[in-house]
Image: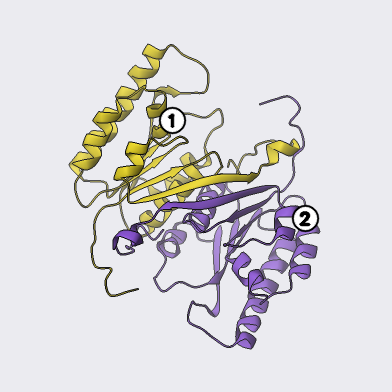
Chain colours: A purple, B yellow
Amino acid sequence: MPQTLRKKKGLILVHTGEGKGKTTAALGLAFRALGCGWKVLIIQFIKGDWKYGELDAAKKFEGQLEIHQMGEGFTWVVKSDERQKELARNAWEFGKKAMMEGQYPLVIFDEINYVLDYQFLPLDEVIEALKNKPENVHVVLTGRNAKPEIIEIADLVTEMKKIKHPFDEGIVAQRGIEF
Amino acid sequence: MPQTLRKKKGLILVHTGEGKGKTTAALGLAFRALGCGWKVLIIQFIKGDWKYGELDAAKKFEGQLEIHQMGEGFTWVVKSDERQKELARNAWEFGKKAMMEGQYPLVIFDEINYVLDYQFLPLDEVIEALKNKPENVHVVLTGRNAKPEIIEIADLVTEMKKIKHPFDEGIVAQRGIEF
């Protein structure tokens, strides 16, 4: 490690791109952080059709890992824009409050980029909150089409790029490997 | 899910590219799989300088998650090629045996692409074993510079592409967020 790398702060990490691994890499970060004894909060803005393996795994870390799925949650099923905005607002308010209170050293806003891309949440408000988060809190923002303004304030941005995907070859998503 | 997606099989997943998140996304997959009650084996071909949070987190899944670091392990500290090859051989033989026996539905060969890129392991031998692995075993291969032959036999390949990295801005790697 070069001697010049001295500054420490809570990072803003972004996982974006069309490829798989955005949420999964966030989960991996959660797993590591939990191993270090940190409390971790995951806000899921989109609820998939499957039951996440992570919900069961989370039980091993009761009191340390909280996964918050918003009410009925988003799904890929189309709802009215007004309802989407209301759900996004609830999720965001819950997560923002937790982030600002600083009790979770790691807060993951899963699929928030999607929500911002569709303007279900005001970008300015999210940017403002992220800029003012406590120094000890690391934040992960996942989802495709991360906004340039998000990338601008982020410390680490990784694009997950699809090179090859099993759906191309007619293989189903599978419990356990829900990538 | 389209009705045409019927085929199920143990997948070969590859996380490659220069960006961060390759190992982390593999860890996320492990976390999900553990939640589904699967046994998971992680073979670490390169041992980093830090103590991984995942080693502590793994204790929560004793008897279910095994992380195998090879002897002294690889490090980024230069060793003789002969010693590198010997260590890679040990790691590979251990992992291959476990993969072939099929007792771990998920086997992660962490940084094997690096090892193959440096020719510390014969590519043909790895390809051959992967082609003949049990149908119920999912395999994840991580590391930059994945070989074309590996990509060819893989089902899912994701390239993690660096868009922005905190080391560019002089921020140190941190325990808990060891991305």
SS for callout 1: helix
Horizontal side of A89 relative to B18 (left or right) equals: right
Q: Chain of mark 1?
A: B
Percent x, y of residue A105: 66, 53
SS for callout 2: loop
Percent x, y of residue B53: 53, 41
Q: Residue under label 1, please give it.
A: B114
Q: Nearer the viewer, residue A55 or A111?
A: A111
Residue B68 at least partly seen:
yes
State the mark number for residue A134: 2
Closer to the eye: label 1 or 2:
1
Q: CA distance from mark 1 to mark 2?
A: 37 Å
Give the residue type at disc 2: Pro
Q: Nearer the viewer, residue A142 or A55?
A: A142
Quadrant (top left, top right, bottom left, bottom right) of the C terminus of chain B:
top right
Residue A102 at least partly seen:
no
Density class for disc 1 (Cα within 10 Å; few <14, some 14-19, many ≥20) is many
Give the residue type at disc 1: Tyr
Residues at marks 1 and 2 on the same chain: no
Quadrant (top left, top right, bottom left, bottom right) of the N terminus of chain B:
bottom left
Task: Write the residue at 74% across / 73% down.
Answer: A122
